[in-house]
Amino acid sequence: MTFSKLWQEIQGCTHCEALLPLPPRPVLQASAESRILIAAQAPGIRAHHSTTPFDDPSGDRLRAWLGVSRATFYTPTNFALVPMGFCYPGQGKTGDLPPRPECAPLWREPLLEQLQNVSLTLVIGQYAQAWHLPNSGKSVTERVQRWREFWPEILPLPHPSGRNNRWLKRHPWFEQEVVPTLQERIKTLLSAESHQ
């Protein structure tokens, strides 16, 4: 199946319609030429309404970690934004519900097979890390602390949500060591892309 045909089918998916709190609306970004993959959890309510991934304060923090502008971030040949679940899963007691489990085997696996130019995968949060880095640790903190084991192809990240402000204060090494290394790699990859 071609990338464009697969993309069309993803956008029209209603597989989980009866299980979702709102009408299905896959929110993701990708191109067959994407160089960097960002694997996160699932779109939040704001992304559902705007149809733009990371169009919130979490996205602002993530872009700051990456050292890129909104325009660079939302250029699909630069970044593929492919969460574990493509539709807003609904609200739980302490935040959004987990991504729908049907999405990854149905759409995510064939989509990732199309992304042959990805040189770096950023894996955000527990659900994406459990999928991309199985048997690599019991917690997000443990995986992020061991980031050098996966570098430079994969980098586990905490979620950039404001809910993690306390985590960032307790782990200052993340913004002191990991973020500058990440920014340098992003700059190198995007520079290589612009000179091809």
Image (cartoon, grey):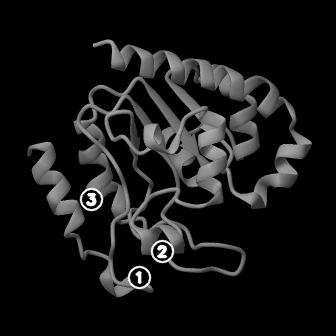
Residue 152 visible in this rendered orientation of the protein: no
Q: What is the spatial separation of the Cα atoms under label 3 and label 1, in whole angstroms?
A: 16 Å
In the image, 12: left or right of 27?
left
| Residue depicted at x 39% and y 66% | 51
Q: What is the spatial separation of the Cα atoms under label 3 and label 2, in whole angstroms?
A: 16 Å
Q: Earlier in the sequence, mark 3 or mark 2?
A: 2
| Circles 2, 1 touching at the beta carbon (< 8 Å) | yes
| Residue depicted at x 42% and y 60% | 52
| Residue depicted at x 75% and y 38% | 142
138 vs 21, nearest the viewer: 21
Residue kind at label 2, given as amino acid type: Pro
For residue 172, which quarter of the picture?
A: top right
Q: Residue 106: which disc?
A: 3
Residue on which disc 1 sits: 20
Q: Position of residue 18 (x, y in %)?
A: 33, 87
| Residue depicted at x 30% and y 25% | 117
Q: Secondary structure at mark 1?
A: loop
Q: Earlier in the sequence, mark 2 or mark 1?
A: 1
Residue kind at label 1, given as amino acid type: Leu
For residue 37, which quarter of the picture?
A: top left
Q: Secondary structure at mark 2?
A: loop
The residue mark sitting in front, 3 or 1, is 1
Q: Earlier in the sequence, mark 3 or mark 1?
A: 1
26 vs 46, nearest the viewer: 46
The quadrant in which the C terminus is found is: top left
In the image, 22: left or right of 94?
left
Q: What is the spatial separation of the Cα atoms under label 2 and label 1, in whole angstroms?
A: 6 Å
Q: Position of residue 137 (x, y in %)?
A: 68, 39
Residue on which disc 2 sits: 89
